[in-house]
Structures are given as structure tokens and as C-alpha cells.
Amino acid sequence: MGRVAVVTGGTRGIGGAISIALKEAGYTVAAGYVGNDEAAARFREVTHIGVYKFDVGDFAACENAVAQIEQDLGPIDVLVNNAGVTRDGTMHKMDFEQWDKVIQTNLGSCFNMSRCVIDGMRQRGFGRIVNIGSINGQAGQYGQVNYAAAKSGIHGFTKALAQEGAAKGITVNAIAPGYIDTDMVRAVPENVLEKIIARVPVGRLGKAEEIARGVLFLVNDEAGFITGSTLSINGGQHMY
Ligand code: NDP
């Protein structure tokens, strides 16, 4: 039987491409989402991938979802912490809810989900965790102290958990995407986006499938010597 993979935020955007790539590579996939039932239903219909609705910022909800997924599909071998949100604003205009929502969804989720799968991975002596960071966690970004802090935190989280998991066959890596053509980036005003693309040496936005390729590489059974690393996939925009 193939390995079981969970992709949070796995029903659209980058996560959708990751879910599909994993399924095509033979993994049994569970795709999480939080509110967009229509997109999730469409995704399930087209891909035949199981979808699970829960808030990754809520620890109890993650516990329930992981238990349900394991009951439906079996023990989880691969976790992709991909779900993320933005609530942009400069510091002097940002309220606590904007801060808290982004920290809980982007960073708290990595603890919540990893904590729920780590015992099983340790017992079985195998695990692959990939956390989706961001170029803006590496370089910072005007109007994104919340998002940059959360994504930067992911990179520290990855290195610490990688050290803990190494002796148990668990690798933990991060991917830091540059600007990828998804709903999140389509929400950026066009004039701002033009300026961003002008700073990308490759001269275009990335594709979700290009991030999925990186995930597939890192979760492979044969990638056991790659741990604690961050793979930047950003068209050369930021060389870290
Ligand atoms: P999208 O906005 O296109 O999709 C986000 C996904 O996350 C959706 O499936 C959404 O569910 C889910 N999600 C959001 N909040 C929660 C939550 N609280 N609990 C569970 N699921 C949730 O995002 P992208 O595909 O663009 O981004 C994916 C990841 O990549 C994010 O972590 C993002 O920060 C990161 N990233 C993206 C970049 C880009 O250029 N697009 C660049 C760098 C990093 P639902 O459909 O129900 O809303």
C-alpha cells in the first residue's frame, strides 16, 4: 500500500498542486481546507482525493482531523504544512486580530499538525514533514510583519524539529516559494504585482506545480539525508 500524505490547504492553489502531484506519485492523499466548500467539492470531484474541513489554527480540530484521516486512510507518513493566510497592513494600522490570525494559521498550524502526527512517525521510524514558508519570511516585506514573522518562524521550527526527528527516520524541511500564481497573489493590486515581477530574474510568477515538484523531491523515501534544509523556489528573486 502507498504512503499516506496529508496536505493542509490542499484543495486549491499551491496545496492543490501538491495534493495532485502526490496522488499521481502513488501516495494516498488527504487534502485539508477550512471554509471554501465549493472549491473543496470541485477538487474532490475532479481528483477523487479525500477532503477534510478543519481549522489548522485550532489544536483540538487538528487532533480530530488527524484521528479521522488515520481511521479512513491509515497512519500518516507525510505531512505538508501548507495552509496559510495573509492579513496585510503596516504595523501602525495592524490590529491584534490580524497579527494573531496570521501567526496561528501559518505558524501555530505547524505545531498543531506536527504534534498530532509525530508520535506515530517516531513509533514507525519514518516520517516526512515539509513546511511551506515564504520568500517574505526570508527577506521581510513591507506591510507584512505578521506574515514575515510567521514564515520566518517556520524556518526555525523546521531546523529544530529536524534535529529531534533525525534519529527516528523523520526528515523535516521547508520550501520558501517566491511569488506563485494563485488566488493569494491574484489579490495583490496589478501595479504592485508588475513591480514584483520586474524583480524576478526568471521574469514571471511561479506555478503551483513548480512548488509541488520540490515537495515530491523532499518527501521521497530516498531523501532521508535531506533534513533541516530550506529549498528556495523563487525564480532567482532572493538568493539566501
Ligand atoms: P491560497 O490562498 O490559494 O490557498 C490557501 C489554502 O489554505 C486553501 O486551501 C485554504 O482553505 C487553506 N486555509 C487557509 N486558512 C486555513 C485554516 N485556518 N485552516 C485550514 N486551511 C486553511 O494560498 P496559496 O496556495 O497561494 O498558498 C499556499 C501556501 O504557500 C501558504 O502557506 C502561503 O503563505 C504560501 N506561499 C504562497 C505564495 C504565493 O505566491 N502564492 C508565496 C510564498 C508562500 P479554503 O479553500 O477553505 O479557504
Image: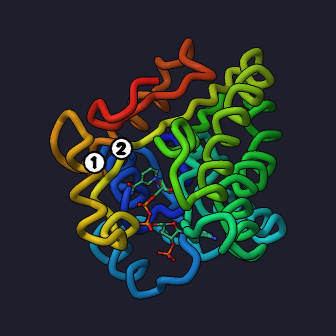
Q: Mark 1 and ligand 1: say if the CB distance to the nearest ligand atom is below 8 Å.
A: no
Q: Is residue 87 above or below residue 70?
A: below
Residue at x 52%, y 55% (from the top left corner): 142
In percent of width and height, residue 23 lies at: 37, 50
Residue furthest to the front in view is 92
Q: Is residue 192 above or below residue 216?
A: below
Please give left or right for residue 222 compared with residue 21 in the image. right
Regarding residue 68, the answer to whether it shows in the image is no
- Which of 116 and 161 lies nearest the eye of the viewer? 161
Three-letter amino acid code at disc 2?
Ala
Residue at x 21%, y 58% (from the top left corner): 194
| Image quadrant where residue 93 sits | bottom right
Give the colouring mode of the picture.
rainbow
Q: Residues within 10 Å of mark 1 (few under 14, many from 20)?
A: some
| Image quadrant where residue 203 sits | top left
- Asked whether the beta carbons under mark 2 and mark 1 sit within 8 Å of each other, the answer is yes
Give the residue pinned by disc 2.
212
Q: Residues within 10 Å of mark 2 (few under 14, many from 20)?
A: many
Regarding residue 31, the answer to whether it shows in the image is yes
Mark 2 vs mark 1, CA separation in Å: 5 Å
Three-letter amino acid code at disc 1?
Glu
- Which of 105 and 226 lies nearest the eye of the viewer? 105
- Which of 141 and 121 lies nearest the eye of the viewer? 141
Residue furthest to the left in view is 203
At mark 1, the secondary structure is helix
At mark 2, the secondary structure is helix
Give the residue pinned by disc 1.
209
Residue at x 43%, y 45% (from the top left corner): 27
